[in-house]
Amino acid sequence: MSEPGNPAVGSGDAADPADEALALELAAALADHRAPSDVTAAAKALFTWRTVDAELAALVFDSLVDEEELQVRSVAGPRTVAFAAGDTEIEIEIVPGAEGRRLVGQTVPAAAAEVEISVDGRSSTAVVDQLGRFSADLPVTRVRVAVGLVRAGERTVRTAPILL
Amino acid sequence: MVGEGRARVEQGEVADTVRRAAAGDEAAWAALVDAFSSLVWSIGLRSGLSRADAGEVVQATFLRLVEKLDQVREPERLGGWLATTARREAWRVSRQAAKELPTEEEPDSDTPEPGPEERALESDRARVLRVAFGQLSDRCARLLELVVVLALPYAQVAAVLDIPVGSIGPTRARCLARLRALLPDDEP
C-alpha cells in the first residue's frame, strides 16, 4: 500500500478512489454506530441550561461514583449528590418514600425560602425550612431532576439536571 | 439518520466553534453536538450499555460540556476530553442500572444492534461489510469507526486515540486494505 502524501489533512483524504468508495460503503453499513437523531436533539436542547438567568451549580459529589472511587462501602446507602456554585451548596439525598421515593435536600447556607424542583421538565415549588431543608416526592422510575433556589431580588442558583 | 460526509466542524474550527458556543451562539453548540455526539454514543455502546443508556451517556457528557464551555483550555483536544468524560459517565450509568436491577447480572447488548426492521432492510453488501468489520483488529476497527463512520476530524481522532495526527492517514489506508482483504472475492 502506498501511503497518502498528506496524512494530516482532516478531510478529503485524497487517496485511492477505491478506498473512498469502500469508506463510503462502510459508513453506510455502520450507520447505527452514529448517534440517533433523538439523542442528538436532546443534547442540543441542553444549551438552554446555560442561557437561564441563574448560576449553574455543578455536580461536586455523587455517592454512586465518588464513594466507589474512594473504596468506601456504600451498602444499600442512599444515593447522595451535591452541587456547588460559589459559596452555595445544594445536597440531595434519595430515600424510600410512602409511594415511591422521596427527595430530601438541603441548601448551605440556608438562604432561600423556596426551591423549584424540576422532575422530567415538570416544575413544582417546595418550601425551605430554617435549616435550608426541603423535600419532594419522586416516582420509582429514573427521572431527570434539577433544583433551583428561589430568592427574591437575587441572582439564583440552579443545579445541573441529574438522573436520579 | 445522520447525513453522510464530514461533520461540519473541521479541525481548526473546533476552537472557534467552542468560543462562539461559550459566548451564547446556539448554532455553534448544535454544530459541536453534531460533530461529537456520535463519538460519545459509540463509547457508551463500547462500554456495554444498552442504546437507551448510551443515550443517557450522551446527555450527561454534553451536560458536562455545557457546564464547562467557557473553561475549555485546549479545544483542539476536545474529542479526548469528551471521550474521557463519556467513559466516566458510562461507568456511572452502568452503576446506576446495576443498582436498579439487582437481579440482572449484566447490562444488555454489547454491540450496536439495529432494530429488526433495519436488519430486514439491510442489504447483503452491508451485512458482508459488517461481518468483515467485526473481524478487524481492535485498532483498525476503532480507527475506521472514528475516521470513516463517525467522520471525526483527524486532530480529534488523534486526541481520542492518543496517536500522532500524521499516522492517521496511513493507518486508515492500511485498515481499509485489510477490510477489503476480509471481503469475499469478486464482490461486484
Image: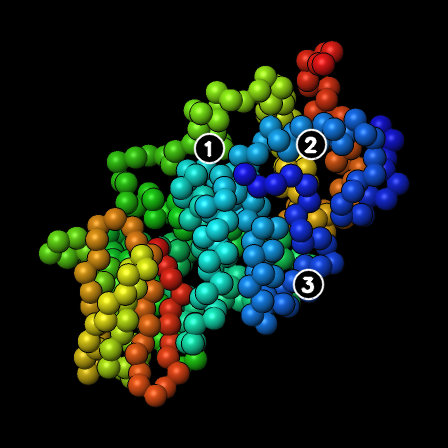
3 or 1: mark nearer the eye? 3
Please give the chain letter of the residue carrying mark 2: A
Crowd around label 3: few <14 · some 14–19 · many ≥20 (10 Å):
some
- Location of mark 3 (residue): B15
What amino acid is at disc 2?
Leu
Residue at the spot x=48%, y=20% of the render? B120
Residue at the spot x=48%, y=29% of the render? B114
Are the residues under badges 3 and 2 in a single subunit? no
Could you tell me if residue B89 is visible in this image? no
Residue extending furthest bottom?
A: A153
On residue A24, the disc is: 2
Seen from the viewer's position, the closer of residues A103 and A55 is: A55
Residue at the spot x=43%, y=76% of the render? A53
- Location of mark 1 (residue): B110
- Residue A36 place in picture, x, y as percent: 50, 41
- Residue B140 place in picture, x, y as percent: 68, 33
